[in-house]
Image: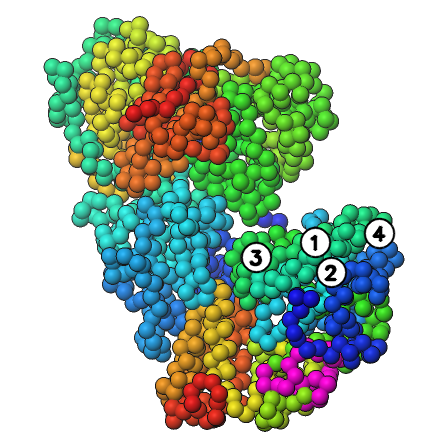
Amino acid sequence: MSFYSPVRTNASEVAESDRLHLLKYAEDPNQCSIDTYVQRGGYGAWRKALTSMKPEEVITAIKDSGLRGRGGAGFPTGMKWGFVPKDSPKPRYLICNADESEPGTCKDRVIMERDPHAMIEGMAIAAYAIGSHLMFVYIRGEFAHCADQVEKAMNEAYAQGQLGKNIHGSGYDLDMIVHTGGGAYICGEETALLNSLEGLRGMSRIRPPFPAVAGLYGCPTIVNNVESLASVPHIINRGADWYRSLGTEKSAGSKLFSLSGHIKQPGNYEVELGFSLKTLIYDPKYGGGILDDKKLKGVIPGGASTPLLTPDMIEVGLDYESLPEKGSMLGSGAVIVFHEETCIVWVIQRLIHFFRHESCGKCTPCHEGTAWLEKLINRVESGKGEEGDIEKIDDICSNILGRTVCPLGDAAVMPIQSAIELYRDEWEHHIRHGKCLVKSQFGLK
Amino acid sequence: MAEAVTKKAPSNKATVTLTIDGRSVTVDKGTTVLEAARSLGIHVPTFCWHPKLKSVGSCRMCYVEIEKMPKLQVSCATEAMDGMVVATDSDLVKQGRRAVIEFILMNHPLDCPTCDQGGECQLQDLTFAHAIDDSRFAFQKERFVEDGSVSTFDDVQIGPEIMLNRNRCIQCYKCVRANKEAFGEFDLGAFERGNITEINAAPGRQVDNPFSGNLAEICPVGALTGMDWRYKIRVWLTKTVSSICPFTASGVNTLMYMDETKNRIYRTTSRRNDEIDDGWLSNVSRYAYQVVHADDRLLTPFIRRDGKQVEATWDEALDLIAKRLSDIQDQKGCVCIGGLVSPRLDNATLYGFNKLMRHVIGTNNVDYRTEYRMLPQTPEDHYQAACSQPIRISDVDDSDVIVVFGSDMLKEHPNLYLRIRKAFNFGAARIFILNPYSTKASDVAELEMVYHAGMDEVALGAVCLTAVEKGIVSSDETDRLREAIAFDSASAAALACGLEPDHLELMARAMAEARKVTFLAGEIISRSREREPIAAAICNLNRLFSINTKGQFGILPGHSNSRGAHHLGLAPDPPASIKAKLRSLWGQYPDTETNTTDSMMVQMRKEEIDGLIIMGANPVMLYPDRAFARESLEKLDFLVVSDLFETETTELADVVLPLSSWAEYTGDYVNLEGRVQTASKAIHPIGDSRPGYAIVEAIADRLENTLYTAEDYRRDEIDTMLEVDTACPVPNLYVPSKGGQDEDDAEYPIALMIGDDPHHRGHYTEKSASLTSHVGEAYLELSPDLAAGHEIKEGDSVRIESPVGKVVLPARISEHIRNDIVFVPRNFPSAPVTSLLMRKRRIDRVRISKVVR
């Protein structure tokens, strides 16, 4: 299949496991065809929900399962669905957020490429649960091949009567629209996504009102991540208790982690939440250790916007509670690994360039602050930094952190502040000596 | 007075109580922390917040600290909650705001000495307030450089009156938001993102919408500045004077900026009045001040000697007027003198004019409606009833159904047009528009129903019949209603006026189910020959749907003091209550025949009226039958015209008197709600011009009959008049509403509509350079199909012919107009479009052809 990107997965492990489920057929191109998907039990959960469950029962099942949003914020999915006002006369919308743009993250892509029906089935169940008759999937513009794949799957679903009018004789109608973004990171933020979908400039909205109350076109709207929705059919099929038995007490279920950077076997791996970060990096089943057997220098555990971890901090469970104890976050599950020959100032320069470029231009601290930070960090990275620059960078970060509408500002500064705290010597070396402390492949030598 | 507009009744809304800076305050639920603070007089600084736009919380200047919330909160987007404890001035708040200013100043050029916003710049003021004297930003500022820009300041002119400097922009997006949310315009946008976001005109567009002047006014910095004000004067050297827009019937509140030493007005801004204008000015209201300083203002009186008008002194002019009027009175009687006055003039002028005509001269030949055709001598009861209903502008906001009938709102009442948009965007209004041609408000309308020209009353009748037939409303007088409408069934009426039965039903249901209805009719009705039967149809609709018990309805007056003119008895045959009050004030009231503009003209042609005084009106240009008006006035023995400029009418005058504009004396105006508002004197009269009231009083003095024996009496008499209740009762039964129709004329197949361009109103506005820079000449608006049928392209010269006249105008092709109708603005003396009109027609019909060179 030309759609496939050659990303390594642990599909064979998942296939043998009774617990892991998301990547079970990730290495089988036939899984994209609805016939194969249905043969393997696909759309069974959809039929079950539609014909034998009330919408409230679906919401209860998801609440009981402990499923939390896999896009980064980790908000309980079932609770979110429960926020849709019962008495609103307005139409409701379900949106699948497939604008996967967090640097390092490529887990949703793998679902869309290799198991698109799982996502569509999850969307359908979610739409039914909230009483929506129209659902959208907002796919990152660069993922043109994913959009093709999803659209093809959608057409198959329509043809087989999984979508459309009077589905499975239930009297329930459900339509789906595939929409591709224009290439803005901010549109992965749910309110900016709504603006973009409405044809407006991709800028975040003030909350409250939350989208569940007033979202797309002012109507109740639920926005869920691809991976969250792809987990839904498994929960409906096998029950909330089963799902709850996976992972840890507060972080139920399994999750995909996109492992990248200086790692021997980069790829997408499904593990139960609470899985050891160290094992993920070093176990031959997963990362297989650091590239060229060099020493580990640091890890960004949850995508470009999460604070860094140093090697002594990696004995940590990958879940919603353990990582914050180490000062970081689970985020979207993008684990980026750096080995010893990486200049941390250079890493941060790459990151701030990204965030400055992606700042939407709404909040003063973010659009001006990221531009200023980029100039200062460029200066330090190029060896022309001045005494006081580190303090200035840290102070500017403080003036951005928590002071913007959406989390982009926070995302931009959290890795910087942690990089200064954890690797201050490298920053100081750049300033005082005009040289890099480490033998770095990129940036200042 | 209809009613002294009272303050809004206390709302029944739930309230919350919170503490701000140690002071307790109770506000309506839904109020923001910012507004709660401002209600205590605590000023929280802002850039992006605007009281009439949705909060976006982007500038982050309005930070406050709220107990139990770890982060600073933006007060503009945080709803006040019970028990909140807010600090607006804590150390953390100050630090947060200083950081925001530091961020904004990073790339903001410090070109304050050459920036027009200097002195009224929010960024300048807040930098000053926070005493920020240094920047930690030690890099080159980002700069937008315009290719080929000759200016060192990187300025780009993005519209006829708007200059953009992107370097000064602080990205508050207020301009883009106002344009979209308040005005429904999309000629301005934000491009790119992050800190290189730029505001600019939409590709291939100019920022020239009819409200574009507001964009420069609301810009908190000097990114958008007005061309009219640019580099002319520093704001701190001007004095501000409260005024009223004389071109809008809403009576938009304005502030004039003037320099006493130069006796000159430099600009107009809004003087926000939430009950009228929400702080928005149409460009007409904003740039009208330039009319005052137009270089062809009349500066001295003129007297016709040997066929030529020559300069004269006031004494010479007044003596001549007194002598000639006395002669006519002596020889032929006072009924041979008439007077026409503009309803844009202030109360003192209008009342004085009335007293001069009726009391001093003793004639009932008085009228202020010089633009309406075929005004009958008998009172139009239903029309008067529909015109005198109480209307409150702010009641549009929370109406859940708004019906616009026979009115091009944007052109006639720009601020009501904005209110309707607001009711749609910020309220929950369903809007229905019934017009003979498509209008700009259609984008917020649930339904725009375009009926055949000349079928106004039939369209309303069809709504009523639909409601009855479908059982939407019940009535035990159905037979009477059918009889009044003169159609047997809804379908027959719908077919006759060209409306869809489904649409009629939808509208009828909406009106029946509504909690609060606003029904507004406008100039298309008032200008119709059949205004009386159409008004009867409005009254019938009101009766069937009980509109006045659950909302408001009425025909809106056309001019800034039309309502005042009505109250002060300027109609030829005013309501009995007014006549009685005038009689008691003056001790007498003439019992002579009453004549309207139209019947006066008929009498002039018969040489039964020999002398005429016209003040501020231009019937030759605006009466809907130019040849008839001109020929009538030419028959006069003696014509006095007082105006700001030489006009088509002053050309015919024996005496021309220079009139002062509204900015040159203090005057009161009654807006369409009945609200009396004052425009204060901003400058001394230009040249030898005099205010209207002074002119009529001087004429009375020369006629040896002083209008007021003491200065106070003028005001006392006017106040007495304004207290008279003039509301005419709405008929308490269904009244006949069948209007007459013209005979078909196959040679002239296209209906012609005449009205105002959105950038002009009546005459005068073509003297404002800023308005003519938007639209400077008349045009013919026609549909693409009609144009194609005549092989006409945009801009081509088109000959428009009616049975009585011919005009050549450039074509403007519009998607919004039907194939059987064309529109021409009446505002330009160079295009005498009233010469196409015939006063006895209901609908003027024309034919068009391309001019081949």
Q: Distance between the residues labelled 3 and 2?
A: 23 Å
> Label 2 is placed on what type of residue?
Ile
Q: CB atoms at circles 1 and 2 under 8 Å apart?
A: yes
Give the residue number, with chain letter if any, for mark 3. Answer: A195
From the top left corner, tell me how far across and down residue B673 is, in percent. 47, 35
> Label 4 is placed on what type of residue?
His
Give the residue number, with chain letter if any, for mark 1. Answer: A176
- The chain containing the residue under callout 3 comes to A
Lower sequence index among marks 1 and 4: 4
| Residue under the point 43% across and 33% down | B813
Q: How far apart are marks 3 and 1 (CA)?
A: 18 Å
- The chain containing the residue under callout 2 comes to A
From the top left corner, tell me how far across and down residue B202 is, in percent. 42, 50
**Dot 1 alpha-carbon crowd within 10 angstroms: few under 14, some 14 to 19, many 20 or more:** many
From the top left corner, tell me how far across and down residue B709 is, in percent. 26, 27
As displayed, is residue B438 above or below residue A382?
A: above
| Residue under the point 85% across and 69% down | A239
Q: How many marks?
A: 4
Give the residue number, with chain letter if any, for mark 2. Answer: A120
Q: CB atoms at circles 3 and 1 under 8 Å apart?
A: no
Which of pointers 3 and 4 indicates the residue nearer the eye?
Answer: 4
Q: In the image shown, does B128 or A328 lie closer to the viewer?
A: A328
Q: What stretch is highlighted in magenta?
A: A261-287
The residue at the far front in this view is: A1
SS at mark 2 in the image: helix
Q: In the image shown, does B367 or A173 lie closer to the viewer?
A: A173
Lower sequence index among marks 3 and 1: 1
**Dot 3 alpha-carbon crowd within 10 angstroms: few under 14, some 14 to 19, many 20 or more:** some
| Residue under the point 24% across and 31% down | B644
- The chain containing the residue under callout 4 comes to A
Give the residue number, with chain letter if any, for mark 4. Answer: A168
Residue A110 among those drawn in magenta: no
